Image: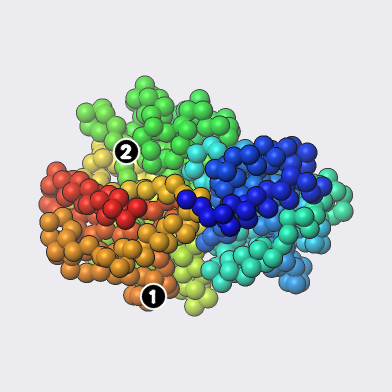
Amino acid sequence: MMSNEEVNRARARCEVWQVSARFDENTRREAAGIAGSEEELLSCFGSELSFGTGGIRGILGVGTNRMNLYTVARAAWGLAEYIKKTDGASVAIAYDSRHGSRSFAEVTAGVLAFHGIHAWMYDRLMPTPMLSFAVREIKCTAGVMVTASHNPAQYNGYKVYGSDGCQITEQGAAVMTALIERTEYTALKWLSAEEAAAQGFLHIIPQAVYDAFISRTLARRMVMPSAANPLRLVYTPLHGAGLEPVRDVLARMPGIHMKTVNEQCAPDGDFPTCPYPNPEMKEALEPGIAVAAEYGADILIATDPDCDRVGVVTRQKDGGYRILTGNEVGLLLMDFILDHSARQDGKKNIVIKSIVTSDLAFAIAKVHDSVVAEVLTGFKYIGEMIGRMESAGEAETFVFGFEESCGYLAGTHVRDKDAVMACMLIAEMAQACAADGQTLDDAINALYDTYGYIGTRLLNFTIDDAFPMEAMGILMEKLRASPPEQLDNTPVTVIKDYLGGIDGLPASDILSYENGTGGKVMIRPSGTEPKVKVYISAKGKQEHGVQLNLERMAAQAEEWLGIIQ
């Protein structure tokens, strides 16, 4: 139940959007239509879109808590204020296939142009890793990627990058947030794309940047299989931005026989064949699995709309198909890359993973005499660590970074998840297996036989509240006040609270519970969605027993959060 004060504050915001000439006629009309419903009023105007760890993300629509031209322009205004004192300030911009993405990219360029800042924009939709690459290649001050990653069609988002090609730092985000919050919607001004171009402030990113990205990607191949080692591969971009670069890379690899999922190739913000365009989800992969079965493919690869995450389905010996988890693909790539990575001047190779990603990485690294470094959840932390390694002259020791959420990176020319490169490496790895009469299904089973089985599961709890960020904060506070004592019928032996900063990591709102038998549950609120994420893992000799452990721990986690909510 919202207080009268909160309702009145939302109504006051809505009234501004109804009457101010700053807003277009359709926006004013929609705002007027919302004013009569208290529920809609609070949902659309009850709060501001939060500028989180990398930017803003939300449902498309009218209001201060929705993605629209005005909330995007306000974010761009904050970015312009943040960088305009930098000599020769410039911003690279890219966008994916979502509704409004091109318009949001153009209004960003228009706001920057109003402030006298140059914008470099791709002339067609491009993936997130190509935005990160362009920032560094053109030597821009910052970057903007318009995308909501793998969220449903009603969402869009806006990620901000620093000059290093990484998502903006916590400190930078805090400064930008303050600049955004002090900007009134009625004060926003911007040039049209045509005006910005005519005045010399909007430039097209040259084709040479795209070509350089493709070349740098191909240069990271681990081995050079020949056409004599054929691999049947099916690829789907899930209606997103991946088709052009992924196809260009795989077409240059000998022996790769690629077929696309035609019904999912055309960019389409409605995502008609996969309402949730997440390459981890079976529903999104089913059209591709059908094509793979018909084609007799060894492997299916899927990328999300902004092509920074990749999902993998492998053929099994019986002709069926198995969806690999993000952890499994990451562990396979880690083992494959370490197998083919030379040491740099006697130094150990380094793999970087997030704290919620499979701990089996430590056992694999030990066998390869390599090191695993852990960072907080969010690929920007992997990018930041690569930057520190580069500053120390040790960038070449970095060989691989990954997160359980299907994000992978090899090489240092991109500082975010890179599904284009991941597609290449996965295809190369599958091709090497096929040359030995094996599949990736055989490879992951062999990995478990060698290192032991670790099962994982991710639970997402959607917070249905007009003020979801506040609600998630209250939920985490209650967990801290009453921590669980049992996990999988075994006493909790280790509790870690990352809010104060532990294990050499900065402060983060994450709780971790472990028992003495290898069971672990980690809980954190999402920084971009109204969700609480629960990461569960269990160890054992047999998959069946581990899956039973995961079932019990998942039920416990649901009980903890259910009681609290």
Q: Is residue 80 left or right of residue 356?
A: right
Residue 255: x and y, percent? 42, 36
Q: Residue at x 40, y 61 (%)?
A: 474
Residue 336: x and y, percent? 33, 53
Disc 2 element? strand
Can you see residue 451?
A: no
Say which quarter of the image contains residue 432. Answer: top left
Q: Which residue is mark 2?
A: 323
Label disc, if present, on residue 500 of the rendered structure: 1
Count of number-bearing discs: 2
Q: Residue type at mark 2: give it.
A: Ile
Can you see residue 5?
A: yes
Residue 462: x and y, percent? 41, 47
* Nearest-to-viewer mark from 1 and 2: 1
State the residue lying farthest toward the right. Answer: 199
Q: Is residue 42 left or right of residue 459?
A: right
Q: Residues within 10 Å of mark 2 (few under 14, many from 20)?
A: many
